[in-house]
């Protein structure tokens, strides 16, 4: 039995696994569209997670296909539950309509004056 080799480039990986990524997007959209901003945002997020899996892949963890499917699906489910995307701690993005975003209440008059003076 021949062991499946990892894609040699990100471009090759995207070409090879796009059908899986689009199927994942379609299935996720059908189940959770009520809480997702747009299908395009969902697709971009899934590709982001794919690149994350590609960059972290270690051949000792098994085949790329199995690893990628596990990571992308797991991270997508985490994000659907409100978690930040991987690698995004300071300025997270989201594809969800209503996601809790922590903020700091600012009551310092000097800061507020600065903000008001420097608006558009």
Image (spheres, rainbow, N blue to C red):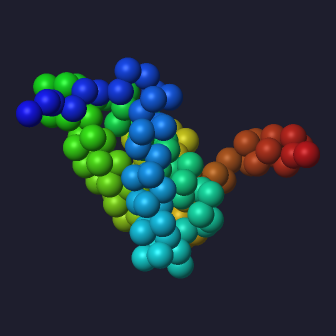
Q: Is residue 26 left or right of residue 75?
A: right
Instruction: Name, please, the residue furthest toward the front.
Output: 1
Q: Is residue 59 shown above or below 37?
A: above
Q: In the rendered view of the protein, which quadrant contains the N terminus?
A: top left
Residue at x 91% of width, y 46% of height:
120
Residue at x 73% of width, y 42% of height:
111
Q: Nearer the viewer, residue 99 or 85?
A: 85
Q: Nearer the viewer, residue 36 or 69?
A: 69
Q: Is residue 12 left or right of residue 104?
A: left
The x, y position of residue 42, in whole percent, is: 54, 58
Residue at x 42% of width, y 69% of height:
27
Residue 94 visible to the viewer: no
The x, y position of residue 63, in whole percent, is: 20, 35
The x, y position of residue 83, in whole percent, is: 39, 55
The x, y position of residue 82, in whole percent, is: 41, 61
Q: Nearer the viewer, residue 88 or 26?
A: 26
Residue at x 35% of width, y 27% of height:
7
Instruction: Name, please, the residue furthest toward the top.
Output: 8
Q: Is residue 34 shown above or below 88?
A: below
Residue 65 visible to the viewer: yes
Instruction: Name, please, the residue furthest toward the left.
Output: 1
Residue 115, quarter of the rendered image:
top right
């Amino acid at each position: 039995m021949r062991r499946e080799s990892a894609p040699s480039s990100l471009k090759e990986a995207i070409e090879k696994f796009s059908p899986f990524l689009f199927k994942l997007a379609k299935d996720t959209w059908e189940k959770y569209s009520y809480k997702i901003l747009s299908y395009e945002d969902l697709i971009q997020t899934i590709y982001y997670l794919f690149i994350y899996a590609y960059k972290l892949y270690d051949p000792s963890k098994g085949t790329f296909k199995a690893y990628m499917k596990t990571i992308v699906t797991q991270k997508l489910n985490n994000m659907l539950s409100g978690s930040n995307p991987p690698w995004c701690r300071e300025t997270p993005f989201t594809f969800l309509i209503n996601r809790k975003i922590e903020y700091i209440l600012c009551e310092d008059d000097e800061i507020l004056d600065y903000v008001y003076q420097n608006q558009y």
